[in-house]
Image: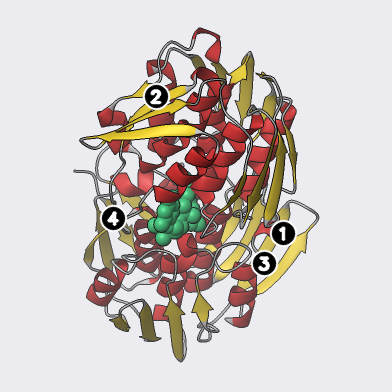
Amino acid sequence: MAELVIAGGRRLEGEHTVQGAKNSALPVLAATVAARGRCVIRRCPNLSDINATLDILRHLGCGVTRAGDVVSVDAGALSGCLVPEGLMREMRSSIVFLGPLLSALGCAELGSPGGCEIGLRPIDLHLEAMRALGVRIENEGGRLRCQTAPGGLRGARFALSFPSVGATENMMIAAATAKGVTVLTNAAREPEIVDLANFLIACGAKIHGAGEGVIVIEGVERLHGAEHTVIPDRITAATFLCAVVMCGGELLLHGVAPGHMDAMLSVLEQAGARVRRIGKNGLQLRMSGRPRYLPMIRTMPYPGFPTDAQALFMAVSAIADGTSLITETIFENRFRHVGQLQKMGADIRAQGNVAIVNGVPQLQGAAVNACDLRAGAALVIAGLAAQGETRVREIWHIDRGCERFEEDLRALGAKIERTEPERLF
Ligand code: UD1
């Protein structure tokens, strides 16, 4: 199995162009199923999760081509509403095909995605939202058979009990072609929701209020094809920023959306980083010396501090001067990196969903496991700052979400190698 081998302790300096957001590209690609006509999606990162999504699209009968980061999907020949078990398991977010299939064909059949590394991840909110639109759902031994009421999807008023990102996405896509108006309350407000809404609007949907707590969707007869460029990935952008905060140095980020990163940038500034926004899409970060302890972090739905960045910031706090307090409120099993960071000499006490991190002056290289995607990225940046050699195993987790990770870190001066050639997606 491939590993990342890191020789730590080098200052980082240079420029980095941020990839397209995985968490935007996935629902946008799934939503192409609901459009009649060719969709061209730009800035799709080259990742195993994106590839799994393209496999599902092909399996459903869509014509899919890819040239670099441009993916073209034609759902004109959509022939089936079944997402196979294997593909469903490969990527939990394949649940976001539910809304598009119901919109396009009036039926969807998928395996229940089950838990994953970071928690149970139930799909009850997705199913309740679809039921509100008149969908009948039967669970046959773990397989979900979903069918719209005669006459198709019907607009409805629906309140989410928690602002789930995926459930909001499924609801927006399905309601876009439902009969009548849908009012979704307590909707997720993540930038990825706004991006998906913008794509759907480009396809002819009538969606108001995306990015706010109440989204109003006026159903239209049909959606047509459209072109769309995916927003920048705020979490991989934060990964590079955190790496420089830990190692010291200077970074110029291009193609970033600083406005999506306020909660994270504020913490980095309080830790001692000098951050300068350059125009709408540039960001410069300078760091010298040891980071100060982090202000209290509590993961929250957007615009709060993102759960996807929690592990990265825990890595920073592990070498910060002073004690940091980190609380995870979104997922119930998202501290698996704690044990791995401890192997590197971090002083962390975790109980339940709270971690108390007493920063140590220096981490030591160790062999660690990338227990999930973001935890894996956090261990890599910890390795970059540590003394000696760090070997990160199970890096397929990292390949799910970080494009050209080690190449781009090397360009900043990091010493990091993969023991086997990168899998070609
Ligand atoms: C998305 C992101 C993921 C991020 C998360 C929270 C994608 C592909 N993934 O995941 O990277 O960490 O948002 O920002 O975009 N929940 C339920 N029932 C449901 C759905 C969710 O109880 O039906 C719970 C989850 O278990 C979790 C919380 O709601 O505790 C948030 O989940 P949700 O916002 O749905 O996250 P995802 O869309 O799965």
Observer able to see residue 85: yes
Q: Which residue is mark 3?
A: 262
Kindly indicate the quadrant of the structure image that contains residue 263.
bottom right
Q: Are marks 1 and 4 in contact (CB under 8 Å)?
A: no
Residue for point 20% across, 35% down: 141
Q: Earlier in the sequence, mark 1 or mark 4?
A: 4
**Residue 145 placement, left or right of 168:** left
- Measure the C-alpha gap from mark 1 to mark 4: 30 Å
Q: Quadrant of the C terminus?
A: top left
Q: Amino acid at mark 2?
A: Ile
Residue for point 30% across, 73% down: 338
Observer able to see residue 17: no
Residue for point 44% across, 65% down: 330
Q: Which mark is residue 87?
A: none
**Residue 61 placement, left or right of 295:** left
Q: Of tags 2 and 1, which is closer to the observer?
A: 2
Name the element at disc 3. Answer: helix
Q: Which residue is mark 4?
A: 117
